[in-house]
Amino acid sequence: MARPKDLDPSSNPRALLGCELRHAREQAGLSQEALGAPIFVSGSFIGQLEAGTRRMHLEYAKHFDAVFGTDGFFARNCEAVSKSKYPDHFAEAAEAEAEATAIRQYAALLIPGLLQTKAYAEEVFRAYNPMATDDMVDALVTRRIERAHILDDPTTPLVWVVLDETSLRRKVGDGTVMAEALRHVAGLARRHRIIVQVLPFEAGAHAAMDGALKLMEFEDAPPLSFVDAPNMGKLIDDPATLTRHMLTFSLLQGAALSPKESLALLESVAQDYEHGEQHP
């Protein structure tokens, strides 16, 4: 097989690397499942690599070079594109988020990063790491706010968020920070840029009692689910697990207030924070 040229990392390197992988696989007459089997990954995972929604790890890249006889091409370019401005446990999820055509998320304890204001994000990061320097926190906040630029497009991705009422009532920072944060979310909903629902305390037990959930869909790749915990996170492409997570989100939507009722509650709680009223 002819040796491909190294990729230009100034363009979209993961997408370009994925295109080269797809070309090499098709030239070799291999299915996605056949290529993934020796390294114990699914055909869906190979499809996500080819679409640029998943990061190619070095051990996989070396395997592809061996299969296709590409003289280290995939390994070299894998290393060139593996650097990320995000923490390792979240890097793949953030990169996939930027490529998604639809994002559906249940937030159990706090406003999701994609919808946070600068002041709210700063309070969150200071709580995560009280010993961080101002420069460290500023860098983290900047990266979080930059993620929200995917909402600059008026229609894509579709963003549908179910907020647990806890995320409205837990005071992150002072009342001014909370009022601004909730009005920011409400403003996105009023501009029809996101759909937001609130899962009220009165809903009682629900389908995601054990944590948060994010589902992402893509134009040319299978969907992904992301689950996280402190300083760790995992992208999931297993079809059975994805089916269960999709059902979970549907159940949450059914238990939550309507978008109209949710917007009214967001603005009411924001007003309470502005007036200094306490919340349970």
Image: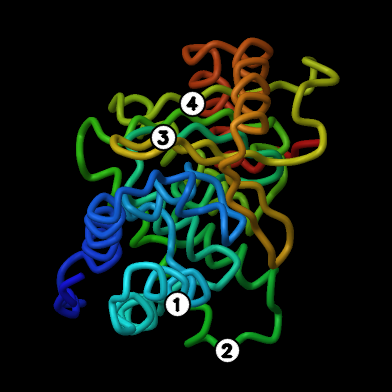
Marks 2 and 4 sit apart, C-alpha to C-alpha, by 34 Å
Q: Residue 108, position in %: x, y? A: 70, 39
Q: Amino acid at mark 1?
A: Lys
Q: Amino acid at mark 4?
A: Val
Q: Residue at x 26, y 60 (%)?
A: 24
Q: Amino acid at mark 3?
A: Glu
Relative vertical location of residue 28 with respect to residue 260 in this rendering, above or below: below
Residue at image mark 3: 217
Query: As drawn, is 64 to the left or to the right of 280?
Result: left
The N terminus lies in which quarter of the figure? bottom left
The C terminus lies in which quarter of the figure? top right
Q: Residue 121, position in %: x, y? A: 52, 61
Query: As drawn, is 206 to the left or to the right of 74?
Result: right
Q: Amino acid at mark 2?
A: Thr
Count of picture labels:
4
Marks 2 and 3 sit apart, C-alpha to C-alpha, by 36 Å
Q: Which mark is residue 196?
A: 4
Asked whether the residues under the numbered discs 1 and 3 touch, taking CB atoms below 8 Å apart as contact, a structural biologist would say no
User: Of callouts 2 and 4, which one flags the residue occurring earlier in the amino acid sequence?
Assistant: 2
Marks 3 and 4 sit apart, C-alpha to C-alpha, by 18 Å
Query: Which secondary structure lies at badge 2?
Result: loop
Q: Residue at x 30, y 60 (%)?
A: 21
Q: Which mark is residue 109?
A: none
Residue at image mark 2: 133
Q: Residue at x 78, y 23 (%)?
A: 201
Query: Which secondary structure lies at badge 1?
Result: helix
Marks 1 and 3 sit apart, C-alpha to C-alpha, by 28 Å
